[in-house]
Image (spheres, helix red, strand yellow):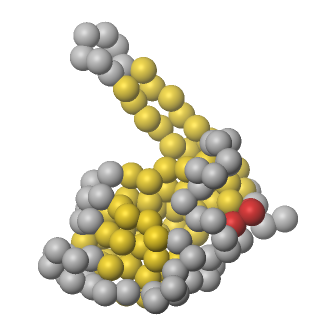
Amino acid sequence: MKTHTHKSEWSNGSGPPVTTAIQRTGGMEMNISEAIVASATNQLFTIAFAHEKLKMVYLKCDVDLVIKTNSSSEPTDTINLTAGEELFWHDGMPDGSCPFTDDVTALYLTEANALDGNLVGGILTDPT
């Protein structure tokens, strides 16, 4: 079994920070470390997972990035990542909040600011 942990911290500046950790376990993980070419348009990233088996999703890119799922011309989902901001989801969050609404067979990555970048993250699923 694979375990993914997401830690976050909040502080108002006048007291000690409040830290939380969310942990999920699943039978399969897909780790992402992908170089994004400057001005990439629909750069293919091969990955596949079943939507209903998702346990945790974490994505972060150091440049603004548009992610399309399954098709570059008629995507199932379009996700806009802002440079430096994370996308985080786990199966304990409210229904409808998952960034993926259906099974994923591929990601298409577009970077429109003429900057090289790096997409990092992980997908945790329970394939049973």
Left or right of residue 4, residue 59 in this image: left
> In the rendered view, would you say 127 is above or below 45?
above
Quarter of the figure that contains the C terminus: bottom right
Query: Please, which residue is most extreme toward the left here?
Result: 114
Q: Quadrant of residue 65?
A: bottom left
Quarter of the figure that contains the N terminus: bottom right
> In the rendered view, would you say 43 is above or below 11?
below
In the foreground, 65 or 128: 65
Residue drawn at the location 74% of the way across and 62% of the way down:
53
Residue drawn at the location 44% of the way across and 82% of the way down:
108
Query: Please, which residue is most extreme toward the right here?
Result: 128
Location of residue 111 in the rendering, given as x and y in whole percent from the top left corner? 27, 76
Q: Is residue 93 visible?
A: yes
Location of residue 114 in the rendering, given as x and y in whole percent from the top left corner? 15, 79
Left or right of residue 128, residue 85 in this image: left
Q: Quadrant of residue 67?
A: bottom left
Left or right of residue 114, residue 91 in this image: right
Location of residue 5 in the rendering, given as x and y in whole percent from the top left corner? 55, 44
Left or right of residue 34, residue 51 in this image: right
In the foreground, 121 or 84: 84
Figure disc tally = 0
Residue drawn at the location 62% of the way across and 76% of the way down:
104
Q: Is residue 29 visible?
A: no
Location of residue 77 in the rendering, given as x and y in whole percent from the top left corner? 53, 71
In the foreground, 34 or 81: 81
Query: Please, which residue is most extreme toward the front here?
Result: 74
